[in-house]
């Protein structure tokens, strides 16, 4: 299924986290990426835009997409609708406390950005994930949300000043779901899909969705320490969801990415191993090999499995798109470099 693989570097820094690749209205490639600071989360984290007009051979840096105000900034989704680009960002105190969500918009292919306010239904403690447009025109945007109360936020600051970070809050669950628009993005409704219990530790679900040929919406999720990807299905366009269940797809607590190729084919980007999960070991450095799986039977099986790279290290947070026989995506390598993969099918 894979004919050729090209790999190029987009940028490198002391921190390079979750690059998101999109194509703009003028045909250029746009990569939005978190940089700066020694690690993430950190008060010095910022989000930058990178542009390429030669299919990723060279990249120019247009600077920060959020106005400098001393806060940490993170971006988890970028959507392109004609001339309008929306970047869904998190602004926080450097430890994911005081976590607020905003949508930055650009109307000039990603060079100038304006703050368009909070995302619909989800103003705080939320990561917005990869938007899709269903066959019926509905806009479906997955999310992960944490019900952190103001009382718990204040308790962390008051009682745990030496470790006043988000993951130390007593938050019961991580909720994954979608916000759904049936009127072209004018209004949205929130539809929860599942809640992962966090009594045994923090969970980053990082849901990714795709629409199958029969209209089913599939959601795959990372579940920390489980060693596998987890799945929910919706048969009514995202309004209700099946029970969350473990798949047979190995995963070392790493974000997966679904990309729809055509009516029959769905692609999955993943690092399919669960090394160390039985011993509850850290698997951050075991996020390889990076593989591309393709299903042509509605994600019942994966008939094509290609190793894109088996070079040791951490390949994390792939995100991209399919166009004209190519899957193009960006990915972070070892938290210091953003790479562009161009996979010709």
Image (spheres, grey):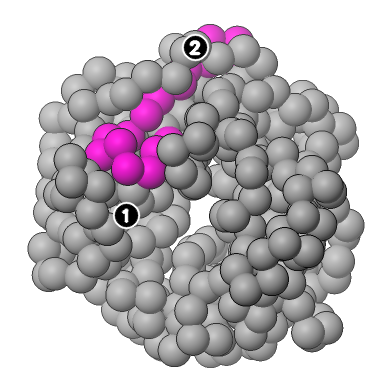
Q: Residue at x 75, y 27 (%)?
A: 190
Extent of the magenta region: 221-237
| Residue position for label 2 | 242
Q: Residue 335: which quarter of the image? A: bottom left
Which residue is located at x 83 percent, y 83 percent?
69
Nearer-N-terminus badge (2/1): 2
Query: Where 263 sits versus 284, above or below?
Result: above
From the viewer's side, name the closer residue of 80 and 257: 257
Q: Is residue 129 visible?
A: yes
Find residue 3 and report its horizontal and vertical position in percent: 13, 55
In the rendered structure, does residue 106 fall within the stretch colored magenta? no
Query: Does 237 sit left or right of 117 as displayed?
Result: left
Q: Work out whether residue 327 or residue 277 is closer to the camera in this orientation and state it.
A: 277
Report x, y in % for residue 61.
57, 89
Judge from the rendering whether residue 339 lies leftward or rightward of residue 79; answer left or right. left
Mark 1 highlights which residue?
326
């Amino acid at each position: 299924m894979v004919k050729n693989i090209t790999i190029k570097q987009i940028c490198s820094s002391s921190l390079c986290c979750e690059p998101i690749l999109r194509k703009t209205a003028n045909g250029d490639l746009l990569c939005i990426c978190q940089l700066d600071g020694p690690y993430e989360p950190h008060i010095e984290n910022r989000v930058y835009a990178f542009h390429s007009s030669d299919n990723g051979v060279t990249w120019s840096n247009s600077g920060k997409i959020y106005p400098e105000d001393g806060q940490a900034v993170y971006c988890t989704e970028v959507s392109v609708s004609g001339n309008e680009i929306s970047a869904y960002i998190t602004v926080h105190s450097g430890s994911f406390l005081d976590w607020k969500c905003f949508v930055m918009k650009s109307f000039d292919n990603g060079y100038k950005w304006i703050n368009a306010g909070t995302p619909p239904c989800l103003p705080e403690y939320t990561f917005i994930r990869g938007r899709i447009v269903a066959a019926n025109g509905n806009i479906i945007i997955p999310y992960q949300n944490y019900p952190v109360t103001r009382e718990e936020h204040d308790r962390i600051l008051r009682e745990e000043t030496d470790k006043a970070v988000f993951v130390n809050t007593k938050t019961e669950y991580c909720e994954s779901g979608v916000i759904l628009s049936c009127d072209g993005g004018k209004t949205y409704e929130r539809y929860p899909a599942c809640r992962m219990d966090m009594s045994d530790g923090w969970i980053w679900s990082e849901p990714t969705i795709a629409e199958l040929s029969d209209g089913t919406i599939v959601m795959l999720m990372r579940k920390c320490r489980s060693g596998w990807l987890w799945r929910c299905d919706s048969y009514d366009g995202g309004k209700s969801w099946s029970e969350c269940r473990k798949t047979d797809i190995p995963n070392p607590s790493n974000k997966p990415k679904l990309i729809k190729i055509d009516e029959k084919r769905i692609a999955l980007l993943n690092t399919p191993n669960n090394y160390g999960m039985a011993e509850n070991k850290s698997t951050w450095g075991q996020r390889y090999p990076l593989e591309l799986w393709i299903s042509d039977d509605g994600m019942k099986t994966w008939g094509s499995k290609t190793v894109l790279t088996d070079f040791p290290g951490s390949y994390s947070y792939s995100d991209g798109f399919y166009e004209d026989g190519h899957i193009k995506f960006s990915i972070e390598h070892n938290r210091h470099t953003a790479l562009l993969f161009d996979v010709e099918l």
